[in-house]
Image (cartoon, rainbow, N blue to C red):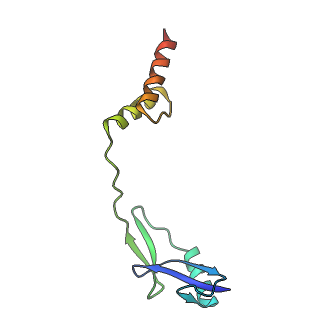
Amino acid sequence: MIYFINYSGGFIDSVGTASAKTVENQITESEYNAILKMIQSAPKAPDGWQYKLSAATLEWMLVELPPVEEDPLTDESALVRYANELTGAEDETLTEATETLIKIVKEDK
């Protein structure tokens, strides 16, 4: 069995095993076991942060996550969301939401 490590930006992303002999970044079984044990016991980071394992020192480093940018809400998406709040439906298009609203109005008459 072959053991390998994946890393980027100076941090370890993962370790794994393979049967092919052409795997890049091969490591020994003992290195694999030690790193895997560290990954499995990673400390819990506060919201907005993540602990990453340094490839150079094998120490956990607290790294701030980039902010999540939400796509701006379109007028159509806003209307569908509002209609779903009113009806309790899970419609995905404005046409579906309109049909649901019409159905409810007809039922109320």
Quarter of the rendering occupied by the N terminus = bottom right
Q: In this view of the protein, which residue sits in the foreground, 47 or 10?
A: 10
Q: Name above or below for residue 32 compared with residue 104.
A: below
Residue in the picture at 60% in, 79% down: 16
| Quarter residue 54 falls in | bottom left
Say whether residue 66 is left or right of residue 24: left
Residue 50: horizontal and vertical position, in percent?
43, 69
Q: In this view of the protein, which residue sits in the foreground, 74 or 85?
A: 74
Say whether residue 69 is left or right of residue 106: left
Say whether residue 70 is left or right of residue 55: left
Q: In this view of the protein, which residue sits in the foreground, 18 or 12?
A: 18
Q: In this view of the protein, which residue sits in the foreground, 96 or 59?
A: 96
| Quarter residue 56 falls in | bottom left
Q: Name above or below for residue 92 compared with residue 12.
A: above
Residue 77: horizontal and vertical position, in percent?
37, 37
Residue in the picture at 34% in, 60% down: 67
Residue in the picture at 48% in, 33% down: 91
Residue 30: horizontal and vertical position, in percent?
63, 90
Q: How many marks?
A: 0
Residue furthest toward the top? 109
Residue 13: horizontal and vertical position, in percent?
49, 76
Residue in the picture at 31% in, 46% down: 72
